[in-house]
Image: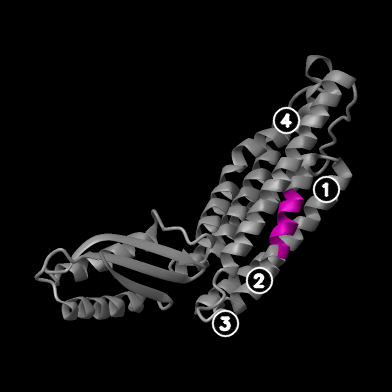
């Protein structure tokens, strides 16, 4: 079920992102607006990423002699690499925009902004991006938000949508200014200003996605979110039924769709028996396994 939902969402991603990417690059060559290159490149990277993601989701649960617990690390590895690509693209676009501003103010070089059909393009791309972001979010929600790949793709599409929306709004505002006198300079540096403003508002999402995927890759603990709350709630209910079992701490790790739960039990209480701890673990694992099929439970005597 998980793989089918992921694959369906990612196929939508490939199709829509290819359309948006080609449209963005085409408009960039017509207008030479850097923000359009940023927009189109985002979409093409996402399209290529979705193709790799489909392959990864197919093999992430495959177990081998070398990897007896599966290749779950492939999912956060993919998400981390994609995050680096997106952040690199943002940095490159920022450098290009700053260079254009420098050329205009210090070297008296510049090219007037040609808007053409940018407004119509921005409106269409904004709708497609936000629609795609919702598709990724919807299918991820169906599987309990366990897919780091769909989380990353949803955030990337949202960022792409914000870029398209911001570009459209900025172009619309600039179009009201007269192309002469004191406002003429805006038509020379408007492209660069739009790009820098968009970068300021869109960097957080891919940065957060990169942090989350990198934490998974490094086997870090889950600090917040639905998965953590659900697991702790299940543990709390089971813990109430075993009065002699004193839990000192809980750590939850997630790598791809594989979840590991470590429960540390304080055994300073001499009344607790190993048979009770074993029964606690058995019943708790059965409850956790009802909701999370790919979960491991470890009991550590502290």
Relative to 45, 130 lies left or right: left
The residue lying at 41 percent from left, 78 percent from top is: 293
Q: Main secondary structure of the magenta part?
A: helix
Give the mark nearer the N terminus: 1 vs 3: 1
For the residues labelled 4 and 1, say whether their Cβ atoms are less than 8 Å apart.
no
Q: Residues within 10 Å of mark 4 (few under 14, many from 20)?
A: some
Is label 4 or label 3 in front?
Answer: 3
Residue tagged 1: 27
Give the mark nearer the N terminus: 2 vs 1: 2
Q: Quadrant of residue 253?
A: bottom left
Relative to 264, 256 lies left or right: right
For the residues labelled 4 and 3, say whether their Cβ atoms are less than 8 Å apart.
no
Numbered label attached to residue 62: 3
The residue lying at 42 percent from left, 58 percent from top is: 221
Question: Could you tell me how far apart the alpha carbons at marks 4 and 1 are, in whole angstroms?
Answer: 18 Å
Mark 1 lies on a secondary structure that is helix
Numbered label attached to residue 11: 2
Relative to 161, 234 lies left or right: left
Residue tagged 4: 193
Tell me if I can see residue 122 in this picture. Answer: no
Q: Which residues are magenta?
A: 39-48
Question: Could you tell me how far apart the alpha carbons at marks 2 and 1 are, in whole angstroms?
Answer: 25 Å
Mark 4 lies on a secondary structure that is helix
Give the mark nearer the N terminus: 4 vs 3: 3
Question: Could you tell me how far apart the alpha carbons at marks 4 and 3 are, in whole angstroms?
Answer: 48 Å
Q: Residues within 10 Å of mark 2 (few under 14, many from 20)?
A: some
Is label 3 or label 2 in front?
Answer: 3
| Horizontal and vertical percent position of residue 141 | 46, 65
Is label 2 or label 1 in front?
Answer: 2
The residue lying at 48 percent from left, 62 percent from top is: 219
């Amino acid at each position: 079920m998980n793989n089918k939902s992921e694959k369906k969402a990612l196929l939508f991603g490939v199709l829509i992102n290819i359309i948006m990417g080609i449209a963005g690059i085409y408009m960039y060559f017509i207008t030479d607006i850097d923000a359009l290159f940023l927009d189109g490149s985002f979409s093409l990277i996402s399209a290529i990423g979705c193709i790799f993601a489909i392959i990864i989701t197919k093999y992430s649960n495959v177990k081998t002699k070398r990897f007896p617990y599966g290749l779950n690390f492939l999912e956060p590895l993919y998400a981390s690499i994609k995050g680096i690509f997106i952040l690199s693209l943002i940095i490159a676009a920022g450098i290009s925009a700053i260079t254009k501003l420098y050329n205009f103010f210090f070297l008296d070089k510049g090219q007037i902004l040609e808007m053409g059909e940018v407004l119509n393009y921005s409106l269409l791309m904004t709708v497609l991006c936000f629609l795609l972001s919702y598709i990724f979010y919807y299918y991820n929600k169906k599987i309990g938000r366990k897919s780091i790949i769909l989380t990353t793709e949803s955030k990337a599409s949202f960022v792409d949508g914000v870029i398209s929306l911001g570009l459209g709004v900025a172009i619309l505002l600039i179009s009201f200014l007269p192309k002469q006198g004191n406002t003429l300079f805006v038509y020379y540096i408007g492209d660069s200003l739009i790009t820098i403003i968009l970068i300021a508002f869109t960097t957080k999402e891919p940065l957060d996605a990169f942090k989350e995927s990198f934490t998974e890759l490094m086997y870090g603990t889950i600090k917040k979110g639905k998965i953590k709350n659900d697991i702790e709630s299940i543990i709390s209910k089971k813990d109430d039924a075993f009065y002699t079992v004193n839990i000192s701490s809980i750590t939850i790790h997630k790598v791809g769709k594989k979840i590991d739960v470590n429960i540390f039990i304080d055994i300073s209480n001499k009344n607790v028996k190993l048979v009770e701890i074993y029964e606690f673990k058995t019943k708790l694992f059965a409850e956790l396994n009802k909701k999370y099929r790919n979960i491991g439970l470890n009991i550590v005597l502290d």
